[in-house]
Amino acid sequence: MDRTEKLLAKLPENTAALLHNPSNIFYLSGYTGEGLLLVAPGIKAVITDFRYVEAAQKQCPAFEIHSIRAGVGHVKLAGELLEKHGINKLLYEDNIVTVRAMRDMEKAMPENMTFEPLNFAVEALRTVKDEEELKAIQHACDITCQAFEYICGYIKPGMTERQVQLTLDYKMLELGAQDMAFSTIVASGENGSLPHAVPGERVIQKGDFVTMDYGAKVDGYCSDMTRTVAVGEPSQKLREIYNIVLHAQEEAQSALAPGKNCADMDKIARDIIAAAGYGECFGHSLGHGVGIDIHEEPRLSSRSTDILAPGHIVTVEPGIYVPGLGGVRIENTCVITEDGYKALCSASKDLRIL
Ligand SMILES: [Mn+2]
């Protein structure tokens, strides 16, 4: 069963799904250009414009490619196809379609059309990765780890965070990444207390911790890894924080297995950090799914009701952030297997002193 059939099997009979979200469109069809995807019994269509017709034909041979024309825009064209197939119930992505686009859609569609939210049906399919997806993510993780080995030999006191970021990004592209998975984070010294620090002109000094959170994109799929390294001998305090985070990361990661509650994974790491007296300094959730998007379901968070299943790919990334001092985060991307998990990032998590 291909992905489109899997989606249709989850929907009520004689119902269409109109996709606006580029990640869902890519997942179902392989198409990366602009436009919409229409899926219904008897319909598999990319609705695009002249600029992308040829690319769409190459990327998704199993789909009909329809190009908009004067007076017939994307939604109207979708409406024509639905009318031809006698389908009058349309599921749409209410988290993506704006209020304005919704009003336009109601006007452009045939009169008898009814609209209902798709309720993340495609996102739900995307949580379980197949072999091909796993291969792409493993490749992205390998590039990330190779770039880490390179950067460890490159970072020297006197360099700026920005220099480290540019070098990491360049290295990943050189190693075959199509793009960065997200904007690379490099946080040195006291900037390490900012979980999503933007690399800037701060000059790296001896005794600093440098946190690097970054990933590569390969064949449309992301990796996500964080390592914190020391530049020269770190203080006792920073070492202590490092060891707590490392312990929390390893305990939570080694608990990953199918059937486990995502919220329990978060609790394992949180309890260790709280017991060490740093509970207030770990203010984000433990991790998240990774795939076409850098943040996907399931979430490893205290509020999550998700259960881990084989094929889920999740990050485990506890951290401790102390304003004025700095911070530590250690993150691996892992796949849930039939009997446990496998870490996809091979870079050592032991403290590296450069
Ligand atoms: Mn992450």
Image (tube, rainbow, N blue to C red):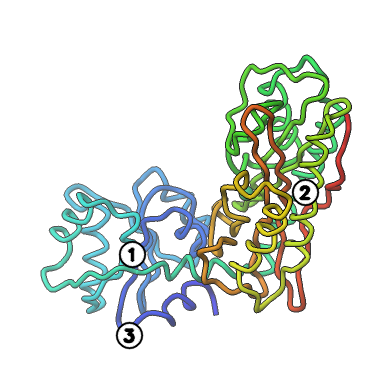
Q: Marks 3 and 2: in contact by CB < 8 Å?
A: no
Q: Secondary structure at mark 2?
A: helix
Q: Is residue 146 above or below residue 157?
A: below
The amino acid type found where label 2 is placed reads Ile
Q: Residue at x 49, y 70 (%)?
A: 124
x, y (%) of residue 31? 49, 55
The amino acid type found where label 3 is placed reads Glu
Question: Mark 2 or mark 3: which is in front?
Answer: 2
Q: Work out whether residue 332 or residue 117 is closer to the camera in this orientation and state it.
A: 332
Mark 2 to mark 1: distance in Å? 47 Å
x, y (%) of residue 178? 64, 42
Q: Work out whether residue 237 or residue 225 is closer to the camera in this orientation and state it.
A: 237
First in sequence, mark 2 or 3: give its number: 3
The amino acid type found where label 1 is placed reads Leu
Q: Quadrant of the C terminus?
A: top right
For label 2, count other residues whose C-alpha is less than 10 Å away and answer few (under 14), some (14-19) or many (20+). many
Q: Secondary structure at mark 1?
A: strand
Mark 3 to mark 1: distance in Å? 15 Å
First in sequence, mark 2 or 1: give its number: 1
First in sequence, mark 3 or 1: give its number: 3
* Residue pointed to by mark 3: 13
* Residue pointed to by mark 1: 18
Which mark, by number, is residue 244? Answer: 2
Which mark, by number, is residue 27? Answer: none
